[in-house]
Image (tube, rainbow, N blue to C red):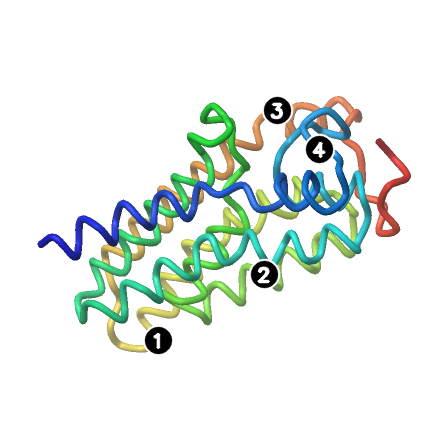
């Protein structure tokens, strides 16, 4: 029981570490919360400082969901424990106490967590994101579309594999709704024609 409590606490705290913000602050001496979209996540890091910062920031942020789930798998054979560790890591990402509970939008941490929980649907959602981004250059639209299709992928893969997990499916629905909700302001800007596309060179549209 003590190990589970420590795992869940560590999962939340690790998920809450704002790697992209810290990477920009410590390596490039830039507070990305004052530039671009003012979000502490990897997309804004890329927007402000370019791929040299944004790409490492993306992978660091992805570990916020990946490592807690892997840790859960090491100490328990119960998939619900792995799922709990992943969910708490995602919540830490979105509501980080290290930045006054103003965290990221949960996309990269969710990708990391579900890459360890159910890798095929996670890869499918990533491919949807890549295709949408390649066509539009809108990170927000790509994230919302990937989040929308992700639960369908989880359910379809579970049925195909012959062992659908109701817990993972319900969690995928909830997490996807959280991601979409976190992007409502972006969607409003998209409808108004005010959302900014991501310049792949980065650092050009602050």
- Residue closest to the eye, 97 or 166: 97
Is 133 placed left or right of 22 in the picture? right
- Residue closest to the eye, 64 or 137: 64
Marks 1 and 2 sit apart, C-alpha to C-alpha, by 19 Å
Marks 1 and 3 sit apart, C-alpha to C-alpha, by 36 Å
- Disc on the earlier residue, 1 or 3: 1
Mark linked to residue 185: 3
- Disc on the earlier residue, 1 or 4: 4
- Residue at position x 35%, y 53% from top? 86
- Residue at position x 50%, y 47% from top? 148
Q: How many marks?
A: 4
Marks 1 and 4 sit apart, C-alpha to C-alpha, by 43 Å
Marks 4 and 3 sit apart, C-alpha to C-alpha, by 19 Å
The answer to whether the residues at label 4 and label 2 have Cβ atoms under 8 Å apart is: no
What residue sits right under mark 4 in the picture? 32
Mark linked to residue 126: 2
Q: Give the image location of residue 142, x and y in percent.
A: 65, 48
Is 189 placed left or right of 151 in the picture? right
- Residue at position x 53%, y 56% from top? 62
């Amino acid at each position: 029981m003590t190990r589970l409590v420590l795992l869940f606490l560590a999962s939340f705290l690790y998920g809450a570490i704002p790697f992209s913000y810290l990477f920009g602050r410590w390596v490039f001496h830039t507070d990305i919360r004052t530039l671009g979209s003012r979000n502490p996540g990897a997309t804004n890091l890329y927007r402000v400082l370019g791929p040299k910062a944004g790409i490492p920031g993306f992978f660091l942020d992805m570990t916020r969901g990946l490592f807690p789930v892997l840790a859960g798998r090491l100490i328990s054979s119960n998939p619900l424990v792995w799922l709990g560790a992943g969910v708490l890591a995602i919540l830490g990402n979105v509501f980080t106490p290290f930045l006054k509970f103003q965290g990221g939008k949960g996309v990269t941490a969710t990708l990391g967590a579900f890459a360890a929980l159910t890798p095929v649907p996670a890869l499918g959602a990533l491919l949807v994101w890549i295709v949408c981004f390649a066509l539009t250059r809108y990170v927000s639209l790509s994230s919302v579309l990937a989040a929308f299709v992700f639960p369908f992928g989880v359910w379809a893969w579970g049925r195909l594999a012959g062992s659908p997990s109701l817990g993972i499916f319900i969690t995928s629905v909830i997490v996807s709704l959280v991601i979409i909700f976190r992007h409502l302001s972006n969607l409003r800007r998209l409808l108004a024609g005010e959302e900014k596309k991501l310049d792949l060179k980065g650092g050009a549209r602050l």
